[in-house]
Image (cartoon, rainbow, N blue to C red):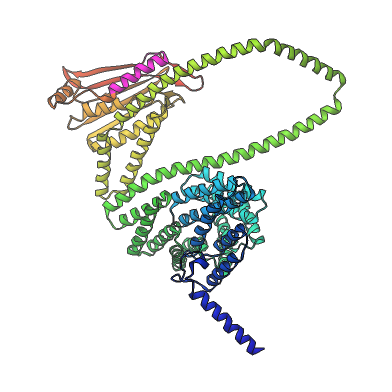
Amino acid sequence: MKYLFSILCFLLSLQFSFAQKDFSDKAYFLVDSLNFIELSKNDSLLILETAKNYHAAKHDTTKLQILENLVDECWNDDVWPRYNLFMRNEAKRLISTVDSGSDEWRRYLYFLGSGTGGIGFQFDVIGQTDSATHYYHEALEYFIKGNHTEGESLIYDALAMIYELKGDMRKALEFYNKALQLAEKNHDSIAIANAAVSLGDLHGELKNYQLSRELYLEAIEAAHATNQKRVEGFTYTSLATDYVDRNKTDSAKILTKIGLKILEDSGNENTMSNGFNMLGNIALFEKKLDTARYYFNEMDRIAIANHQPEDMIIAQSNLYRVERASGNYAKAKIHALNGYRVAKANDFPGLLSRTSKDLAQIYAQQNQSDSAYKYLLEYSILSDSIVNTELKNEAIKQSIEYEYEKQQAIDEAEHEAEMAIAAARESRQNIIIWAVAAILVLISIALVMNFFRLRTIRKQKEALDEAYHQLELSKNDKILASNLKALQAQMNPHFIFNALNSIQTLVLHGDVDSSYDYINKFAMLIRETLNASEQEFIPIEKEIESLQTYLKLEKLRFRDDFNYEINTPDRIPNKYIPPMLIQPFIENALKHGLFHKETDRELDVKITISDTLICVIEDNGIGREASKKINQSRNADHKSYAIGSIKKRLEMMQEKLKTTIGVNYEDLEENGTAVGTRVTIRIPIYDSSSNKTNAA
C-alpha cells in the first residue's frame, strides 16, 4: 500500500511538472504559449483542466462557459485576459452564424457581454476610466439585448464605481440602485453582496450612516451565504468606518481585523488595502506613529503590487502625515510628491487637491515660498470645485431624505383614506347615492355643453402663450448677451493680472496666510461674477458682498495709499436688482480718477434703498477733464467699455421693465479746482414676492 502511494505521488509530480513547463501547443491551449509566464501550481492545473474540458465539450455554449469559469477563477493578470479575449472573439464569431433573436443568439450575447465587460475591468483596475467606461457601456448593450439581467447588474455596479470616483454622485447613486434592484429581483446573492457593499460605501460618503450600516449588513449576510470571502472580508473593513465616525475605535479595530483575517485566509490580499488604511488612521489618531507607518506601508505595498492607483495615492498621503508628525520633513516631502504625481497622472481631482495641500504645507514648513504658492494656488482652485461637489452631495442626501419622508406621508395618507372610505361605506344612505348621481349627471351635461367652447379658447390661449414666449425669449437673449459683455469688461485681464501680482508679492514676502486669504477672495469674486452673468436679477445683499470683495482686492493693490468706505442701510431688504451695474463705475473711479493721484486716495460708496436703489460713488481724484487729457496724451480711448456696455443694458432693461433707470455725473470743485467726481446711479428694485418692479 505504501509502495502504491509512492508511485501515485510520482505520477502526480510528473503531471504537475508537465503543467508547469509545456504550454507551447497553441491549438490545444487556445492562446499563445504560456511558457514565459510565471504560473502558480493552482493556475497550471486550472489551465490544464480547462483545456481538457474545452476540447471534450460538444456544444459551443458549453465551451464558452468553461472559458468564463477560467476567467472567473484565475487571478493571474497575464493569463485570464488572454482567455477572456479568446472567449469574446469566439462569441462574436458564433453570433454571426445563428438567427437574430434565437435562444442560441441570446446565449452568445451573454458571453460577448461577459468578455467585453472583462476588457473594461482590465482598464478599470489600472485607472484608465474612460476606456473602462466605453467597454462597460458596450457590455451593457449586449446584456440588455439578450435580456441577461444578472450581467446588467454587474455592469451597473462597475459603472457606478467609476462615476463615484469622478465625483458624479447622482449618476453613481442611480447605477448602484439599479444594480441592487436587479440583483434582488433575480435572487442573486453574489450580485446583492457586491451591489450592497458599493451602495453602502456611497451612502457612507453622503453621511447617511444608518442606511449605510443596513446595506453593509445585507452585503455581509449575502456574501457569507454564498461563500464570497473577498466581499465578506472587504465589507467588514468598510463597516468599521461607521464605528470610527461614531468614535467607537475599539469596535472599529475588531471589525477591521475580522475582515483582514477573512481576506488573508481566502488569499484575497489585493482587497486588504481598505483594512490597513482603517487601522493606520486609527493608530495615527492615537499617536502610535510606528504602528500607523507599518499599516500605511502595507497598504502602499498592496496597491503597487495590484496596480491600484487610488489606494497608492491615499497610502502616500497617509505616510506624509506620519512623517510630518514625526518631524521627518524630507521623507514627508518624498511621500507628498509621490502621491501628487500619481494623482496627476490618473486625473483624480479629489486626491489631487489632497496632495496639493500636502505639498503646500511641507514647502511652507521649509520656507520654499515659490513652491508653496504654486501648490497652494492649485489646492485653492481644486478645493473650490470640491466644495461645489460636496454641496451637490448634500443636496442629493436631502433629496433622498425628502423622498423617504414624502413616501411615508403618502403611505399614511392612503391608509387614513382607506379607513375613511370604509367608515363611509357603512354609514352611507341611499338618498346620498342618488344625490351624487344627480349631481354627476348635471356636471356631465355642463361639460358636454362647454366642451366645444373650451377647445376654441384653449387654441387661442396656446397661440397667445407661444407668441408671448417668443417675445420673452428675444428680450432675455438680449439681456443675457449684454450680461456676458459686462462680464468680459468687468473681469478684464488687467484686473486679473494686478490681483495675482499682488498675491504673489505676499507669498514672496513669506505671508502665506494672507496670500491664502486673498486667493480665496479672488476665486470667490470670479465665481460670483460668473454666476451673476447667468442671472437676470440677483439679491441686493449679494451685489454688496461682491463690491466688498472687489474693493478688498483693489486695497491690496494700492495698499496704504487707498482708503474706501461702503455705507449701507442697517437692514437690507430681501429684494433684487439687475447684476453687474455698480462695479464698473467703481472701477472707472479708480482707473480714471484715483490712479493718477499719488497719495491720499479716498473712495466713498453710499447705498440707500427705498422704492429704488440709489448708489452714490464719490472719489477725491483728479476729475474727469484732467483724466481725459491724460488719456488723450497717451493716444488712449478714455471711454470705459464697461460703461458703454451698461448704457446698452440700461436701454434694453428700460424697455423690458417699462421704467426709468438713471446715471448722473457731477464734477466736484473747490475754488475752481477739480477735487473729485460724484456718480449717482438709480436702479430699479425687483420684489420677488410680488413679481413686480418698483421704480420712481
Identify whether 66 is placed above or below 93.
below
Q: Which of 354/564 is in front?
A: 354
For the question of whether residue 210 can be seen, the reply is: no
Residue 614 point in image, percent of width and height: 36, 20
Q: Is residue 210 left or right of residue 164?
A: right
Q: What type of secondary structure mainly makes up the magenta span? A: helix
Q: Which of 315/168 is in front?
A: 168
Is 675 in the magenta? no
Q: Quadrant of residue 472?
A: top left
Residue 252 point in image, percent of width and height: 56, 61
Give the position of the C terminus as an image quadrant.
Answer: top left
Please give the range of residues in magenta. 643-660
At horizontal 19% and vertical 24% (from top left) the residue drawn is 637
Residue 171 point in image, percent of width and height: 52, 43
Q: Is residue 408 left or right of residue 34?
A: right
Q: Is residue 582 left or right of residue 160?
A: left
